[in-house]
Amino acid sequence: MKLPESIQVIERGWLSSNNVVLRASTGAIVVDSGYGAHVPQTLALLERVLAGKKLVRLVNTHCHSDFRKARRRSSMTGTSRR
């Protein structure tokens, strides 16, 4: 399935969630932050994918460690936790 250019999936290996980046005129939204041990890799991948676009929100779909730990261990976004 071909996705719109405003949606990009970052496929990850085992034990980490895939990340989805949604681009809008106001900035980017990342869905699922990934496993805590993979923070450096996650940040590097997001930096490349965002290409200077501001990250305005991080949304985690559920509370398994492979979907949310990176948010706790990093300063991926300046937005408030919800």
Image (cartoon, rainbow, N blue to C red):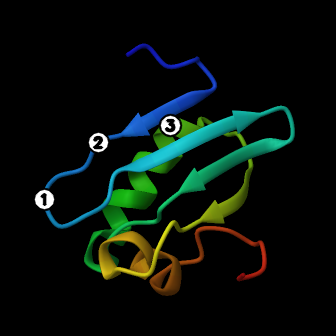
Q: Residue furthest top?
A: 2
38, 30: nearer the viewer: 30
Q: Earlier in the sequence, mark 3 or mark 2?
A: 2
| Amino acid type, callout 1 | Trp
Residue sitting at x 78%, y 43%: 27
9, 47: nearer the viewer: 9
Q: Which mark is residue 14?
A: 1
Alpha carbon separation for disc pair 3 and 2: 12 Å
Q: Earlier in the sequence, mark 3 or mark 1?
A: 1
The reply, left or right, for residue 43 in relation to residue 55 is left
Residue 66 on image: x %, y %: 30, 73
- Neighbours of disc 2 within 10 Å: few (<14), some (14-19), many (20+): few
Q: Residue furthest right?
A: 26
Q: Image quadrant for the C terminus? A: bottom right
- Identify the image quadrant of residue 76: bottom right
Helix, strand or loop at disc 2? loop
Alpha carbon separation for disc pair 3 and 1: 20 Å
Helix, strand or loop at disc 3? helix
| Amino acid type, callout 3 | Val
- Identify the image quadrant of residue 59: bottom right
44 up-or-down from 53: above or below: below
| Amino acid type, callout 2 | Glu
Q: Which mark is residue 11?
A: 2
Q: Image quadrant for the N terminus? A: top left
47, 81: nearer the viewer: 81
Say if mark 3 contacts mark 1, CB within 8 Å. no
Residue sitting at x 63%, y 63%: 58
Question: Which residue has dot 3 on it?
Answer: 49
